[in-house]
């Protein structure tokens, strides 16, 4: 790939733009595509028929597969509505190999009245070659404290910690264990830090708050902004410094901002001219080596809810 089309955002249709890129030029791709749930984008219609949305998904994921290096990785963020379909599509038709199915658990989701309120997004971790890929699991920056370190102060603990796993286990009430917080029902918790024994930072459900409108890191021009720390975990684990990180749905440019901060090259495509312009401005104000916004381990840094003072507040609306 020529240097002229690195470290920028291309404005236009992602499928057409990806067709102009050479085979095997991308090291890591992260995509947070439209979920086809009627979200109000400025130029994209998020109300496609099932057949049209599946064709669209097949086309753009097929191009991602083509432009990935043989050792490349692909992360896909998707909601419940099409998670099963896109997972099968990526595996069975396009040829990706799934290594992990991570759940991103967040607060500030949409408050629902006729069903359980959604507080998660699926993160599929795919590779192009199941035996050749980048996964920097031994790097200290990609490890987290273990229970032996945090809870038991066990001298046998690995001082480098451990990798995050992929599921939070919430023991059902009546299993014989003593609740960590008798005042908080263990199967109906609002925040993971309120039940320390039930939520762990070492599993394959990742807790990062959504970037709500009042958050300092909110860019302000796009309603579906991903947390920098969540993206940072992916970029650090699945790419090396100087490699190319690609996002076909650049949106608020968070993936590219994180890639730049972490010393990677970056490239994005964005359909909206307005999002493209503002994303470029955001990148221009970002420097290599800058600290990522947000708490690296929010489960450890968030304050506990005082006993007897927990309050329920209306949740902000988002596409998730």
Image (tube, helix red, strand yellow):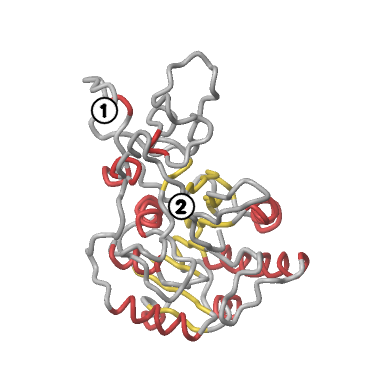
Q: Earlier in the sequence, mark 1 or mark 2?
A: 1
User: Which residue was labeled with disc 1?
Assistant: 149
Q: Residue at x 53, y 70 (%)?
A: 23
Q: Residue at x 45, y 82 (%)?
A: 276
The reply to whether discs 1 and 2 touch (Cβ–Cβ < 8 Å) is: no
Quadrant including the N terminus = bottom left
User: Which residue was labeled with disc 2?
Assistant: 313
Between marks 1 and 2 in the image, the one whose residue lies nearer the viewer = 2
280 sits left or right of 59 in the view = left
- In this view of the protein, which residue sits in the foreground, 206 or 54? 206
Q: Quadrant of residue 157?
A: top left
Q: Residue at x 48, y 47 (%)?
A: 105
Judged from the image, the secondary structure of the residue bearing numbered disc 2 is loop
Against 40, residue 29 (above or below) is above
Judged from the image, the secondary structure of the residue bearing numbered disc 1 is helix
195 sits left or right of 248 in the view = left
Mark 1 Cα shell of 10 Å, populated few (<14), some (14-19), many (≥20): some
Against 43, residue 133 (above or below) is above
Q: Quadrant of residue 242?
A: bottom left
Q: Residue at x 29, y 61 (%)?
A: 262
- What is the x, y in percent for residue 247? 48, 68
Mark 2 Cα shell of 10 Å, populated few (<14), some (14-19), many (≥20): few
- What is the x, y in percent for residue 263? 28, 64
Against 162, residue 123 (above or below) is below
């Amino acid at each position: 790939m020529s240097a002229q089309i690195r470290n920028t955002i291309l404005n236009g249709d992602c499928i057409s733009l990806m067709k102009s890129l050479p085979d095997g030029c991308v090291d890591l791709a992260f995509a947070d595509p439209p979920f086809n749930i009627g979200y109000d984008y400025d130029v994209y219609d998020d109300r496609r028929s099932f057949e049209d949305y599946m064709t669209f998904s097949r086309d753009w994921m097929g191009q991602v597969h083509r432009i990935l290096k043989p050792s490349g990785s692909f992360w896909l963020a998707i909601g419940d509505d099409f998670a099963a379909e896109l997972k099968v599509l990526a595996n069975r038709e396009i040829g990706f190999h799934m290594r992990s199915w991570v759940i991103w658990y967040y607060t500030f989701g949409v408050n629902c009245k006729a069903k359980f309120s959604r507080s998660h997004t699926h993160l599929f971790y795919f590779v192009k070659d199941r035996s050749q890929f980048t996964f920097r699991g031994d790097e200290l920056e990609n490890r987290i404290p273990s229970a032996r370190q945090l809870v038991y102060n066990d001298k046998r603990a690995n001082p480098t910690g451990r990798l995050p796993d992929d599921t939070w286990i919430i023991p059902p009430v009546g299993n014989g264990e003593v609740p960590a917080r008798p005042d908080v029902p263990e199967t109906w918790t609002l925040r993971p830090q309120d039940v320390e024994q039930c939520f762990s930072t070492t599993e394959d459900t990742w807790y990062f708050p959504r970037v709500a409108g009042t958050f300092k890191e909110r860019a302000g021009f796009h309603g579906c902004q991903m947390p920098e720390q969540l993206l940072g975990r992916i970029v650090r684990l699945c790419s090396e410094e100087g490699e190319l990180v690609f996002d076909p749905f650049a949106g608020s440019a968070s993936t590219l901002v994180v890639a730049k901060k972490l010393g990677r090259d970056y490239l994005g495509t964005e359909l909206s001219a307005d999002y493209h312009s503002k994303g470029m401005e955001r990148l221009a104000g970002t420097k290599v080596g800058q600290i990522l916004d947000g708490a690296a381990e929010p489960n450890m840094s968030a304050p506990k809810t005082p006993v007897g003072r927990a309050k329920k507040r209306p949740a902000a609306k988002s596409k998730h």
